[in-house]
Amino acid sequence: MSTIPRIVESFRASVSSSAEKTAPFPYWLLQDTLPGDDAEAVCALPIAPPQIDDTQGKRETNNATRIFFCESSRARFPVCERISRALQHPKAVEALESRFEVTYGMLMALLQRADEQ
């Protein structure tokens, strides 16, 4: 399995080379975001994908069926712990701030606002 620095570098490279799209809204396509062995380890987690019938046009409609890299998942699956630590690493945060011209505080405010809607 990868080390945290290897995951950070893979993530940074993916963010910096991401393709920007503008329609129907601005978004970026990331590729090879995780080292292959970690991507495979996530796919191999013993977690069945949820049955999602209708989103009602909202991302949060099926939140109860989602699996997060939360404290319990991180304790249970080492790959979740490694990826979580890597994505919180200052160099990973810096890559997001630089590429998308935002600060960590702005990102957290946007995520909180999205969760409240």
Image (cartoon, rainbow, N blue to C red):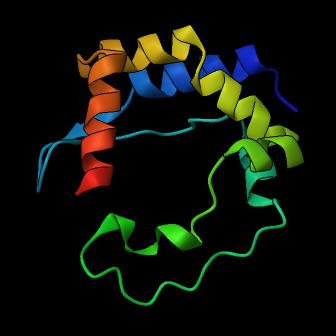
Q: Closest to the observer: 98 or 16?
A: 98
**Does residue 22 appear to the left or right of 101 in the view shown?**
left
Q: In this orientation, does residue 77 appear?
A: no
Q: In the image, what residue occupies the spot 12% across and 44% down? A: 22
Q: Which residue lies furthest to the front in this view?
A: 116
**Does residue 79 appear to the left or right of 12 in the view shown?**
right
Q: How many labels does the image show?
A: 0
Q: In the image, what residue occupies the spot 66% across and 46% down? A: 69
Q: Quadrant of the N terminus?
A: top right
Q: In this orientation, does residue 32 appear?
A: yes
Q: In the image, what residue occupies the spot 25% across and 18% down? A: 102
Q: Residue 33: give x, y in percent of width and height.
A: 56, 35
Q: Which residue lies furthest to the bottom in this view?
A: 53
Q: Residue 70: give x, y in percent of width and height.
A: 67, 45
Q: Report which quarter residue 94 is drawn in.
A: top left
- The answer to whether residue 80 is above or below residue 8 is below
Q: In the image, what residue occupies the spot 57% across and 66% down? A: 66
Q: Closest to the observer: 66 or 40?
A: 66
Q: In which quarter of the image is the C terminus?
A: bottom left
**Does residue 14 appear to the left or right of 103 in the view shown?**
right
Q: Residue 76: give x, y in percent of width and height.
A: 87, 48
- The answer to whether residue 103 is above or below residue 63 is above
**Does residue 30 appear to the left or right of 45 in the view shown?**
left
Q: Residue 7: give x, y in percent of width and height.
A: 68, 24
